[in-house]
Structure formats: structure tokens, C-alpha cells
Image: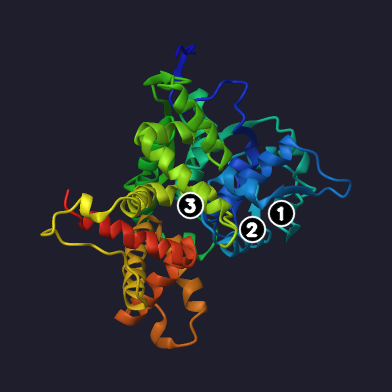
Amino acid sequence: MAHNKTQPIPIGSEPRTGTPDAFRKAVQAVHSKPRSPLTLLQRKLGNAWLKHAIESQPDAQGWWELSIRDLSQTIGFDSNNRQYLKEAAEALMSIVFEWDVMALASKRIHWKASVMFPELEIRSGVIRYQISSQMRERMLNPDMYAMIDMNVVRQFKRAPALAIWEFCIRFEKLGQTGEVSWMTFRDMVLGESADGKTYQEYKYFKSKVLLPSIQEVSTVSGHQIALVETKIGRRIDKIRFTVVRKTKVVEAETPVDSALDLDLLSDLEQIGFSRLDGRRLLEQHSSAALAQALSFTRKRMANAQSEPLTQPAAYFRTALTQGYAKNDAFSATAQASPASEHRSSAEPVHELPATTATLQDSRDKLNRHRAAQAVGYLQQLPEPERQSLINRYNAGQSLAVLRVTSRISRLADASFQRWLANDLWGEPSIEEVFQHGQNVLAAALPV
């Protein structure tokens, strides 16, 4: 099948006119300082709300409306934990920002600080919000701005890394950012609160926040940034960043191999993936594996006896990475063919879990597997976000023995890991337990 090729563009760049996933974020917001810490999810939410507000009209009372499903797709939120999303959104409503802290005092806007999203409603799968009357016009029609691509935003795993990337791309044409006191910058990316003030010494802020964030920016975005320090005597006083767009080029639309791949891309978009994410999946997995996972996901979506599937994209990823679809096909083949045609009498017979005891065993194994994955996820988060999760877990524990402290017990550790897995992905269903059992079984079968 013939394909038309477009001109190559730098990785991570967007046409100067923007892309459907990009929007103009006012410099006052880019260079703002929150009075409280912002989580990664809250930073992504704020970007999604601003983008939607720029692209759509509010109602007569100044409310914008966005379905939670569309919002989740925009920010790449693939968890079933709607409560976590709701709590993050409600907390964002109370965070005060000091605007445009990079500008000279004489050129700053006449108000010093305000809440960006003062009103919020969540009902029937829809989020309704308002933008501060003081900032609305500047946010919707910015004179100076950074071009924020939500395709890139979705890739970030650290809140400080996202904040630093937004700060840096504002200065892309200049090749370097403005210089700023390292303590002011610390408060810009971590919040002007106790979480930010834990880094009283620059060396800790650099090693724990700056360097890991710089690495992430250079990995997930189309920019290469580097830290430049300014000293007064032997003490670091100010910092800035050099900003270079990566020179490696790729075709803006890499041709897919076949009509099947084009159909797969279309199907992936229908369950919530962007075209870019779909192409990445095609690069990482075979067409056959993607088709199997799609078929498995559609079966689950059509199953009227199960709870409605609110996050098909997340379910698809799980089916793909855990091999559920492959094992489902294996199970169907095994049931359709007489065992005697495939095994000699000397070969062992492997049976699927059927009794209550074996089902519980499969559930326990799945819980251990999910707990290990959750711990891996937790270790990738910056310390403030890890502590935020621990605080939320501890708040729900009536027994002191189950709370996470500096001297954590095995019981508390196991309880927290189970809670974290359920918080991220929801309570495992019987179907997921069964599929995991099949996955373990298939791995144990002789090749």
C-alpha cells in the first residue's frame, strides 16, 4: 500500500501554527509560583482545563464543561480511580498562585496572587469549572505564551519535570532561560510551602529534584536542557537553563506497513488512544498482539454482566502487557480441541483453576504481582508525591499498627502495598483473577 510522506520535523516539535494537542499557555501561568505543592495530576489537569477553555465557549454564567472521559484522555489518566481524580481536582480549586514571578516588579500585573480555578462542580461524569476573573482574559488571549503540547505533557512522570519543561520551552528561541534565584525557582516547581522548604540546601534540591527532572525532560520531550549555575563566592545564588531542540529528525507521519495497521490505529483511537500513542504501540508490539488485545477488550466492553468499563485504554494496556488476550486464545483453543490429540498419555495434564481454594490462590498471586508493580511505580515518584500518597493512606487507617511510619512493620507494609495497587487500578475483578491464573499457567506449560 502506497503512502505519502511528509517533510521531516524535529522530534517533539510542533508546527508553528500548533497541533490539535497543543495550546498557548500564558507566560503569567508558566512563570507562576503556587503557594501549595502541585501534584503531577494537578499540573496536567490545569493544562487540560486551560486548553479546553481556549478552544471552547463557556455558558452564560462563565462555566466551562468537560466530560471526565474526555479529560482523562487528554491528560492520559488511565486509572479507574475516579475518587483520586476528583480529590485532585477539588484540591486544585483552593491553590493560590503568585503570577509571573520572572517579570520585573514594575512590569508585573497589578494583582499579586489569586486562585486560577475558583469554582468547580463534578456531577454525572462531567466537570464544570470557572477561571479567575482576574486572569481569564490573559489566559484565553495571551500576548506572551509557551506552546504546550499535551502529547508531551502526558509522558511526564514527575511534577517538577513537567514544571521545568514548561519553564524552559518559553525561552526556546533564545537558547537559554532567564536567570532566577534558585530558592525562587524551587518554590515555583515545588510550591511555596513546607514541601518546598524541605530543600533548604541547594545541593539536596539539585540532586533530588533538578538532576532527575532534567534527565526526564531530555528523555520524554523534544528538547535538551542543561543547568547553568551562578555563584557568589562559593555559594550558588542563581540558576538558568540552556534549551536546545533536538536535531534528530523523524518523519512527521511515519508510514504504517499495511491496511491492517491503519485499521488498528483507527480502532485504538476509538477506545481512547491518541494517534501518536497508537503509532508508538505499533512500534513496540506486533499487529497480531494488538489485534488480540483489542478483541479481548471489546469482549469485556460488550459483557453486560460486568460493571461498565470506564477506561478501555487502561484495560487494553493491561491485557496487552499481561498477556491476557494471548492466554484467552490459548484457553479457547484448548477447549475446542480434544486433549488426546495434543498430549501423549505420559504428558502431565494442566487444569485451569476451578475450586474456591485455587481461585483464592490465584487472587493472592495477582495481589502480590500488583503490589510489586505498585511499589515500582511509587519508587519513580518524587518524595513529595510519595509522601502525599502515604499521608492519604494513613488518614484512612483506624489502627496505628497499619499506618506507615519511619519504623514500618511488615503488616503495615503489606497493607499499604495492597492499598496502593487498588488505588491505582481498582479492586481486581474475578475476570482479572482468572486471566492472571491463565497467564501463570501458560508460562508454566512446556514449549
Please give the label number shown on residue 127: 1
Tell me if label 3 and label 1 are in contact, CB under 8 Å: no
* Residue displayed at 47% across by 61% down: 424
Q: Whole-percent x and y of residue 384?
A: 45, 61
Q: Between residue 176 and residue 437, name the one nearer to us.
A: 437
Which residue, given by chain and number where applicable, does mark 3 sit on?
315
Of callouts 3 and 1, which one flags the residue occurring earlier in the amino acid sequence?
Answer: 1
Q: Between residue 239 and residue 53, name the one nearer to us.
A: 53
Residue at mark 3 to residue at mark 1: CA–CA distance: 23 Å
**In the visual, does 132 lie left or right of 395?**
right
Q: Between residue 215 and residue 260, name the one nearer to us.
A: 260
Which residue, given by chain and number where applicable, does mark 2 sit on?
89
Residue 226 seen: no
Q: Check disc 2 and give the amino acid type.
A: Ala
Q: Check disc 3 and give the amino acid type.
A: Tyr
Residue at mark 2 to residue at mark 1: CA–CA distance: 9 Å
Q: Whole-percent x and y of residue 345?
A: 13, 59
**In the visual, does 337 lie left or right of 174?**
left
Circle 1: element type: strand
Q: Whole-percent x and y of residue 268?
A: 51, 37
Tell me if label 2 and label 1 are in contact, CB under 8 Å: yes
Circle 3: element type: helix
* Residue displayed at 78% across by 39% down: 137
Residue 88 seen: yes
Q: Residues within 10 Å of mark 1 (few under 14, many from 20)?
A: many
State which mark lies toward you, 2 or 1.
1
Q: Whole-percent x and y of residue 132?
A: 76, 50
Circle 2: element type: helix
Of callouts 2 and 1, which one flags the residue occurring earlier in the amino acid sequence?
Answer: 2
